[in-house]
Amino acid sequence: MMPGGLSDTKPATPEVQQIANQVKVQFEIQANMNCVVFAAVEYKTQVVAGIIYFIKVCIYFRRDHLEKLMER
């Protein structure tokens, strides 16, 4: 991998799921939804002045919540 370049895509690990769990609340606030499922699927990393994680997350939220958003 080149310095600053992205790694290959890898399947999510329990460590990556823990990182995703740490940002779940921030995502829910910004997206204005309550996720029932927030599961890391795969990820890439970028090494710069630390490690940046790019995580693909599968989400599931309650349909009634979506209907409330659409009514606005």
Image: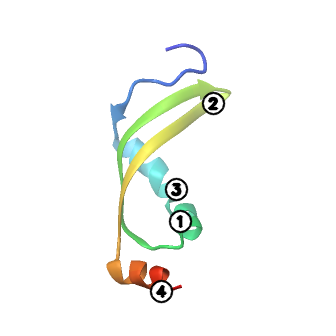
Q: Are marks 2 and 1 in contact (CB under 8 Å)?
A: no
In the displayed structure, would residue 60 be above or below residue 16? below
> In this figure, which residue is indicated by the disc labeled 3?
22
Precedes in sequence: disc 2 or disc 3? 3
Q: Are marks 3 and 1 in contact (CB under 8 Å)?
A: no
Q: Quadrant of residue 60?
A: bottom left
Using the numbered discs, state the Cα–Cα distance from disc 4 to disc 1 in whole angstroms: 23 Å
Residue 71, disc: 4
Colouring mode (rainbow / by chain / secondary structure / one colour): rainbow
What percent of the width, then of the height, locates residue 61?
A: 36, 71
Q: Amino acid at mark 4?
A: Glu
Q: Nearer the viewer, mark 3 or mark 1?
A: 1
**Relative side of 44 to 4, left or right:** left
Precedes in sequence: disc 2 or disc 1? 1
Precedes in sequence: disc 4 or disc 3? 3
Tell me the element at label 2: strand
Q: Amino acid at mark 3?
A: Gln
Tell me the element at label 1: helix
Q: Quadrant of residue 8?
A: top left
> In this figure, which residue is indicated by the disc labeled 2?
50
> In this figure, which residue is indicated by the disc labeled 1?
25
Precedes in sequence: disc 4 or disc 2? 2
Using the numbered discs, state the Cα–Cα distance from disc 3 to disc 1 in whole angstroms: 7 Å
Tell me the element at label 4: helix
Q: Residue at x 34, y 40 (%)?
A: 13
Q: Residue at x 39, y 51 (%)?
A: 57
